[in-house]
Image (cartoon, rainbow, N blue to C red):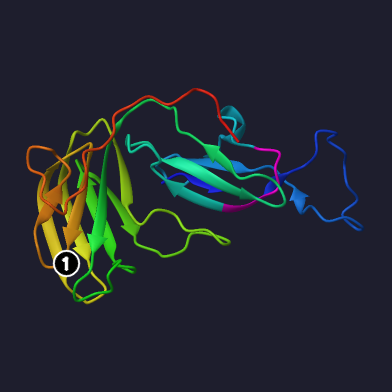
Amino acid sequence: MDMLEGVGRRSGSEQILNLGIHSLNGYERNGLFRNNGDGTFTDVGWLHGVDREEDGRGVAIFDLDRDGRLDIALRNYRQPAGLLRNTGAKRHWISFELVGTRSNRDAVGARIRVRAGDAWQTREVASGSGYLSGSSLRQHFGLGDADTVDEVEISWPSGLRSRHHSLSANRAYRVVEGTEFRSDDPASAQADSFDPLARGTLPSAVSP
């Protein structure tokens, strides 16, 4: 999982402030941290135009155009909100929307573990993601070159556990507690499953 830190940016004058009489509030760069896969992260915000000048406060992450690449909405202090649209290379992915029956309806607190090859990833459903912000409740997993998920384990807040195998990548799945998965694949879509994902390209510019 990559991370975004929305904390604002110092002014273009690059002045050095005396910390004894000034605050850095609103003068720090936003940071986008790439997961290196070894327990460390690298700040790549300046490489991708994410180290914005606005005084960022709230951050929400979601798939705006449902193309499998996560986008970022920024809430700025006394400035217009910003939208950072992901135009990176398309890789394989999978996502899940959990619906609780014995657990709470949004399955907040549920934990999903996904295995593709030898690599495990874990996500936990949370109702808030930052200051006055809430990211999508769909749990997104980047899979790199893997086009199949070998195993999925879900631990529900109620204590129920479910396990599924051999799921196709590049699809969103709706999982109702105590029932089988439902895919967004048009060939197998159910009445209450996801709509087919929109497949489109994103503009190259980062728009405020």
User: Is any part of residue 6 visible from this angle?
Assistant: no
Vertically, is 64 above or below 158? above
Q: Quadrant of the C terminus?
A: top right
Place residue 137 in its image quadrant.
Answer: bottom left
Q: Is residue 145 magenta?
A: no
Which element type, helix, strand or loop, lies under badge 1? loop
Q: Nearer the viewer, residue 72 or 40?
A: 72
Place residue 145 in its image quadrant.
Answer: top left
Q: Residue at x 13, y 44 (%)?
A: 167
Tell me the magenta residue range: 52-58
Q: Nearer the viewer, residue 117 or 44?
A: 44
Q: Residues within 10 Å of mark 1 (few under 14, many from 20)?
A: many
Q: Residue at x 83, y 35 (%)?
A: 14
Vertically, is 80 above or below 44? below
User: Is any part of residue 28 visible from this angle?
Assistant: yes
Residue matched to label 1? 177
Place residue 46 in its image quadrant.
Answer: top right
